[in-house]
Amino acid sequence: MTMPDRADRHVERWQPVLPDLDPDIEGAVTRMQLLTRHLRTVKERALADVDLPAHEYETLHALAGRQGRAAPSALAEDLGVAPASITARVDSLERRGFVERIPSRTDRRRVDVALTDAGRAAWRGALDVRGAEERRLLAALDPDERRMLSDLLRRVLLVAEQPAG
């Protein structure tokens, strides 16, 4: 038997109140919530350490995922925000020297947003802290277990991505 964790104590506390509670479902969901909360806290701390608001980090992250250059409309789509929101974000990031506006390669009337070296460094600084914590947590599993966990979570996520009903 493995050592009990917070989720085990949570299930133990609720089973007398809700006798039909499935301890495996409640345990899994509670663990996912606690891990998500933990990783969110680590992310917030990492962003605070590099003085980067979450919305700016997300914008830099989306830009980095497009090889450091994208049209504002593509960033808006990636982030699921209105194009006007991207303008404000880019203005703020440009003032900080993290991005620059450059002529589009495909349309002379448009501009693209490009990461600067300072922007890439700020993004990587926060990303590296998050990645180190993710690796620390998942080091509790061997490579085959990590693959199995990823596969199991994929199956659950695929159900979540389908409309209920």
Image: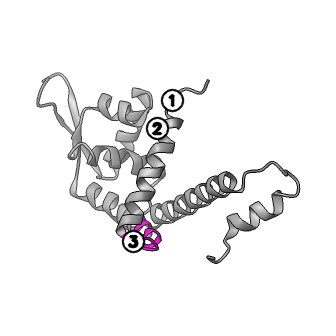
**Which residue is denoted by mark 2 in the rendering?**
158
Residue 136: where, in percent of width, then height? Answer: 43, 73
Q: Are marks 3 and 1 in contact (CB under 8 Å)?
A: no
Q: CA distance from mark 3 to mark 2?
A: 24 Å
Type of amino acid under label 2? Leu
Q: Residue 125's quadrant in the figure?
A: bottom left
- In the picture, which quadrant includes the N terminus? bottom right
State left or right for residue 141 relative to residue 19: left
Residue 77: where, in percent of width, then height? Answer: 37, 30
Q: From which residue to which does the magenta span run?
A: 134-142
Q: Residue 102's quadrant in the figure?
A: top left
Q: Residues within 10 Å of mark 2 (few under 14, many from 20)?
A: few
Q: Residues within 10 Å of mark 1 (few under 14, many from 20)?
A: few
Residue 84: where, in percent of width, then height? Answer: 42, 28
- In the picture, which quadrant includes the C terminus? top right
Secondary structure beneath disc 2?
A: helix
Type of amino acid under label 3? Asp
**Front in this rendered view, residue 102 or 155:** 155
Q: CA distance from mark 3 to mark 1?
A: 31 Å
Q: Are marks 1 and 2 in contact (CB under 8 Å)?
A: yes
Residue 116 falls within the magenta-colored stretch: no
What's the residue at 69%, 53% (across, down)? 26
State left or right for residue 131 relative to residue 20: left
What's the residue at 29%, 55% (across, down)? 119
Type of amino acid under label 1? Gln
**Which residue is denoted by mark 1 in the rendering?**
162
Secondary structure beneath disc 1?
A: loop
Question: Where 107 falls versus 153 (above or below)?
Answer: above
**Front in this rendered view, residue 50 or 94:** 50
Q: Are marks 3 and 2 in contact (CB under 8 Å)?
A: no
**Front in this rendered view, residue 85 or 134:** 134
Q: Residues within 10 Å of mark 3 (few under 14, many from 20)?
A: few
